[in-house]
Image (tube, rainbow, N blue to C red):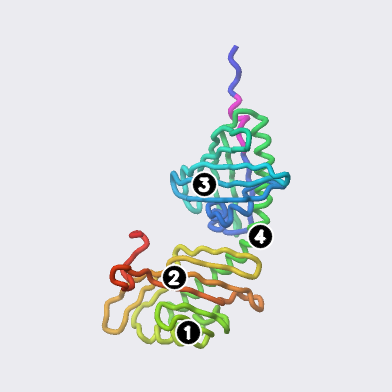
């Protein structure tokens, strides 16, 4: 006698709505600094997390229970289509056993100002393992909601700050460019001296930069990364500069940038930045011609 196929009974489907833009919710699944905050069930603490979010890239989360038992979840990405869809394999490993390789598919849909997440996992060999995983995932989703509520709002504020900052640069708005700069900022710029201390010194660099250019000018950080911890935040990414000096053709250059912000009087203020160009060790000359796709 042939037993009916009960494979569909060994699948997990979860739908949740989060009060955050889908780009932010999507990034909470692919960036290690976010994943480590929620990708473990209640009563467990993440000890290590690595995420290489690209097709065939690997990921791994390790965590331990309150009693010290160690667990690992790992796999590879099948699809990374930001901010719409994510698919990856997942295998659970404990100190004494390993589970089957399952496949997780997550879709992200905008719903008003929020995001609907639809989660689907297949490949369980038993209903018992499926049920245990479903319970764990529901706990993880609750942690994800709390994480987005606390750090997501702050990250959204900082990303909005960068957009306004970029717009101020495009319009040569010196006051707008200085709005997020703390009075006691310490800045490591592209040029001498080694450091600038105070907003007035940074203002002078901005003023000279605006006066030295004509036509269009632009500055943004396309791959901006944001990490928030309470009233402190760190951002990093590659700066893209587009400018035209008087009598010259417009040029585009890329550099590295790391910035530290503190929330002061209810607003994020930059207290430190470090921007730099790579250099050629053979000539000791700065490389202004490099592009991200040439790395």
Left or right: residue 275 compared with residue 226: left
Q: Which of the two residues, 271 or 68, is positioned nearer the viewer here?
A: 68
Number of numbered discs on residues: 4
| Residue drawn where x is 67% and y is 52% of the image | 143
Q: Where's residue 2, x and y in %?
A: 58, 14
Q: Which of the two residues, 211 or 15, is positioned nearer the viewer here?
A: 211
| Residue drawn where x is 56% and y is 58% of the image | 24
The residue to which callout 3 is attached is 59
Question: What is the distance, in whole Å, between disc 4 and disc 2 at their CAs?
Answer: 26 Å
What is the number of the mark on residue 149? Answer: 4
Question: What is the distance, in whole Å, between disc 3 and disc 4 at their CAs?
Answer: 25 Å
Q: Where's residue 1, x and y in %?
A: 60, 11
* Quadrant where the image shows the C terminus: bottom left
Q: Nearer the viewer, mark 2 or mark 3?
A: 3
- Tag 3, which secondary structure? strand
Q: Residues within 10 Å of mark 4 (few under 14, many from 20)?
A: some
């Amino acid at each position: 006698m042939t037993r009916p196929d009960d494979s569909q009974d060994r699948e997990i489907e979860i739908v949740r709505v989060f009060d955050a833009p889908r780009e932010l919710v999507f990034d909470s699944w692919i960036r290690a600094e976010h994943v480590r905050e929620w990708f473990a069930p209640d009563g467990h603490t993440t000890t290590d997390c690595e995420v290489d979010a690209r097709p065939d890239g690997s990921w791994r989360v390790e965590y331990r229970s309150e009693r010290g038992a160690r667990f690992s979840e790992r796999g590879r990405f099948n699809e990374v289509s930001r901010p719409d869809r994510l698919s990856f394999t997942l295998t659970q490993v404990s100190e004494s056993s390993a589970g089957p390789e399952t496949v997780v598919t997550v879709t992200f849909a905008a719903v008003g100002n929020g995001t609907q997440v639809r989660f689907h996992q297949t490949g369980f060999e038993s209903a018992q393992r499926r049920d245990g995983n479903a319970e764990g995932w529901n706990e993880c989703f609750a942690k994800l909601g709390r994480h987005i509520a606390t750090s997501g709002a702050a990250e959204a504020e900082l990303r909005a700050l960068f957009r306004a900052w970029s717009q101020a640069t495009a319009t040569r708005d010196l006051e707008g460019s200085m709005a997020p700069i703390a009075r006691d900022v310490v800045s490591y710029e592209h040029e001498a001296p080694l450091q600038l201390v105070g907003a007035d010194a940074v203002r002078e660099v901005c003023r000279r930069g605006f006066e030295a250019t004509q036509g269009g000018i632009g500055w943004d950080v396309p791959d901006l990364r944001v990490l928030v911890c309470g009233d402190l935040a760190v951002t990093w990414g590659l700066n893209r500069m587009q400018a035209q000096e008087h009598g010259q053709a417009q040029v585009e250059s890329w550099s590295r940038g790391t910035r530290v912000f503190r929330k002061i009087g209810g607003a994020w203020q930059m207290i430190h930045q470090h921007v730099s160009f790579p250099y050629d060790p053979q000539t000791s000359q700065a490389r202004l011609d490099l592009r991200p796709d040439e790395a």
